[in-house]
Image: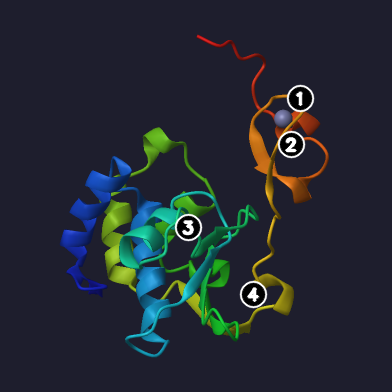
Amino acid sequence: MNIGSHTFDEFVSIVKSFHGHAAPGVLIGGIMVDMALKNLPEGKFFDAVCETTKCLPDAIQLLTPNTIGNGWLKILNFGRYALSLYEKHNGAGVRVFLDPKKLEDWPEIKAWFFKLKPKIEQDSQLLQDQIREAGTRPFTIQGIQLKPEFITKKSRGSIVVCPMCLEAYPINDGAICRACQGEDPYVEHEVY
Ligand SMILES: [Zn+2]
């Protein structure tokens, strides 16, 4: 089985160096991205939506030109193991998800996905073998059409200085920046 232009084993080492270890979620994600790309016209670029923050964004960034930083990958924190690739102007594309109905033949994948075993009891080699063996079978692919409001880029307006923190932010976020509106994650920050 190939993942993009890589063999499965090559992809395992790429994941190790990028993600820190050969995380099953990124390996599975690689198969999902490959499956989506094979169902789209070749030689074109697509925008991506990822429906979980875990592992799957890394597979998308490794196998497509889409990164969080370039804005071609949007992450929605639904906690669903699913991704979509779509044509950025008309919003038509495909969605691939790890299908709970299709996991009965792959007990180790099922145990990992539903967190049925403590991590310490997971047999990571067996899990990796099942991922390789299962290939595209645990996934379902759908044709999708994005909502128009999702395709059009919303401008956040001009950049102004927040009267509270004195840092720059987009004016459309309000009279003060979102951090000062209470979304700031810090207990305190001290200037060095
Ligand atoms: Zn502020």
Report the Cα–Cα distance between label 3 and label 1: 49 Å
Q: Residues within 10 Å of mark 3 (few under 14, many from 20)?
A: some
Across and down, in percent, residue 58 comes to 39, 54
Residue matched to label 1: 164
Residue matched to label 2: 177
Residue matched to label 4: 151
Is residue 97 at least partly visible in the picture? no
Contact between marks 2 and 3 (CB within 8 A): the answer is no
Residue matched to label 3: 110
Badge 4 element:
helix
Q: Earlier in the sequence, mark 4 or mark 1?
A: 4
Q: Residues within 10 Å of mark 4 (few under 14, many from 20)?
A: some
Up/down of 14 relative to 174, above or below: below
Specify the amino acid type for callout 2: Cys
- Residue 56 horizontal side relative to residue 38, left or right: right
Specify the amino acid type for callout 1: Met
Specify the amino acid type for callout 4: Ile
In percent of the image, x 36 and y 84: which residue is there?
Answer: 38
Up/down of 120 relative to 187, above or below: below
Q: Given this view, does label 2 or label 3 mark the residue nearer the observer? A: 2
Contact between marks 2 and 1 (CB within 8 A): the answer is yes
